[in-house]
Image (spheres, rainbow, N blue to C red):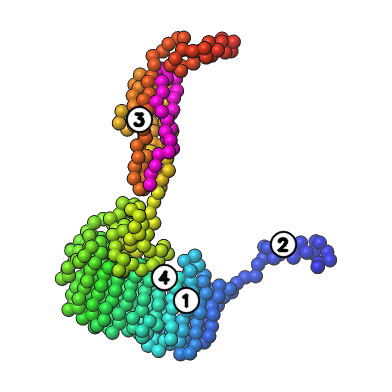
Amino acid sequence: MCSQRAFCSALVAAAMVSPLARADTIIPGGNIINQTWTTAGSPYIVQGDIAVPAGAFLTIQPGVTVLVATSDALAAGFDSARVEINVKGTLTVAGTPASPVTFQAQTGIVAGSWWGIYADPTATSVNISGAVIRHAINGVNSNAPGAVLQVTATTIVACQSSGIAVNAGSPTLSRLTISGCAVGVSVGGSATATIQNSTMFLNNTAGVQVDSAAGTTTIVGCTLDMNATYGVRTTGNGAVGVHNTIVVRGAGWGVYRGGVGTVTITYCDLWSNATANVFNVVAGTGTISADPLLAALGDAHILPGSPCIDAGTGAFCVAPDLFGTSRPVDGDGVGVAQCDIGAHEFGGCASTAITSASGGLSVGAGHPFSLSVTATGTGLTYQWRLNTNNLVNARGLTGATGPTLQIDAAGSYDTGTYDCVVSGSCGSQTSAPAVVTVEPVCAADFDGSGTLAVADIFTFLNAWFAGCP
C-alpha cells in the first residue's frame, strides 16, 4: 500500500493522463516463423517481402492493422517494386466484423500499391476471416491445392486486378464484399471455386470471371450490382452454375458465356443490364427479371416488397447470409421458410394492425377536437383522411400524418367521415370510419359539447365568477 495519500493520488493521476505510448512494430521483411501479431503490437509496418515458410505459422488477431510499404525494401519476389505476403506454411487471419484485421498501403490510397497475399502451392492452410484488404494488385492470389484457401466475411476494395484470384484448388469463398477492382473474383487455370453469400459491385470489368479449364464453379446467393462490362463472365471449358443470385444494373451483360463450357442459371434475378441480361446462355427455372429493391448501391439488403423474397431454391440455400443471418427465413409471412435470391435473407416484418381508434363525436363550432389511432407493425406511417381525401396540416389542423389528428377550432367544413390509413413494411390498414358532426353555435351550449346539459350551467357560472375580459 502507499503510505502517503498524496503520493498515491499523484501516481494514479500520472497513469491516467500519461499512458505508455504503444510503439509501431516494424517488419523489415524476410521469414516470419511462428509469430502471433496482436493489437498490442499494432500497427505492423511491413517494409519488404515477407514469407511464412513451410512448417511455420503466422496468426493475426482481431483488430490488428498491417500497413504495407509502397516500395519493396528487399527488391525481391514476384514484383521487385512491391511488397508481398507469401504463405508456404499456415496463415490464420482471425478478424471479426466488429474488430477486423486490416491490410492496406502505409501511405496513399492507390490501387496496386502492394502486391497482395499469396497462397503458395506448398501452403498448408490459408484461412482469412474478418479482414479488410485495400490497395493491392490482387487482394488474395492463390495457387494452393484443394481447400487450403478459405476466405470468409472479408471486404476487399481498390485493387488493381482481382479481389481474389484463384488459379488452383477448389476454395470456398463466403460472405465477401468486393468493389473497386478490375474483377471481383477470378477463377482460372485448373481451379474451381464456390462463391457464396457475397456481393460484388462497381468492379471495372466483371463481378465474377471464370476461365477454368475443367470442373464446376458455383455462384450461390450472391448480389452482383453495377459491375462494368459483365456481372458473370465465363470463357473457359469448365462448367459454371449461378443460383439464387441477383445480377443487375451492369453496364454490359448480366451473365455472359464466351467459352465452350456449360452455364446453368436457376432462381436468379437478372435485370436492367445495359446490353443484355444473358449472352449465349438460357436463363433457367425460377429466374425472374425485376427490380430487386436493393437498399442502396453497395448495400445488398433487399427491401420489403422485393420480388426476391422467398423466391430462391432450397437446393442452393447456404447459411448464413452476407450479414450473418440464418437461412432460410419466412420473409413473406406465409408460414413457409424459403431462401431468398441474393446475398441478403430478408428477416420478415410485423404485419400492420390497428389496435384502437377514436369513434365519432359531435363538437360545437369554434371548439377543438382530436382523433387518435394506435397501431402495431414495422415502419409505420399515418395519413388522416376526411371523406377519403387526404388531410394536410393547415388552418389550425395538425397531425395529419401522425397518430393523433388535432383541430383547434371546428368549423362546418370539418363535418364528415374521418379515417386514418396506417401503412407499414408489411401492409396497410384503414381505421374504422368516425363521423364528426360540427354543431352550429348555440349560446346555451356553454361548454361546446353539442348538447344542452346541467354542465353548461356550471361552466357558465365558473366563467361568470372568473370574470370576462
Give how far apart the Cα atoms at labels 1 and 2 are.
38 Å
Q: Amino acid at mark 3?
A: Pro
Secondary structure, mark 1, is strand
Q: Residues within 10 Å of mark 2 (few under 14, many from 20)?
A: few
Mark 1, residues whose alpha carbon is within 10 Å: few (<14), some, or many (≥20)?
many
- The residue labelled by disc 2 is 13
Where on the picture, by quarter, is residue 311? bottom left
What is the x, y in percent for residue 67? 48, 74
Q: Which residue is mark 1?
A: 93
Pointer 4: what residue? Answer: 154
Decide: marks 2, 3 in contact (CB < 8 A)? no
Which label lies toward us, 3 or 1?
3
Give me the residue at 32% from left, 77% from top.
193
Amino acid, disc 2: Ala
Q: CA distance from mark 3 to mark 1?
A: 62 Å
Find the distance from the CA under tag 4 to the CA under tag 2. Answer: 41 Å
Kind of residue indicated by mark 4: Thr
| Label 4 SS | strand
Mark before the other along the chain sequence, 4 or 2: 2
Q: CA distance from mark 1 to mark 4?
A: 10 Å
Q: Nearer the viewer, mark 4 or mark 3?
A: 3
* Magenta span of residues: 351-374
Mark 3: give few (<14), some (14-19) or many (20+) Cα within 10 Å. Answer: some
Q: What separation in Å lies between label 2 and label 3 (alpha carbons)? A: 68 Å
Whether the magenta-drawn stretch holds residue 463 is answered as no
Q: Residue at x 40, y 75 (%)?
A: 151
Tell me, for residue 433, which label it has, or none: 3
x, y percent for residue 404: 43, 33
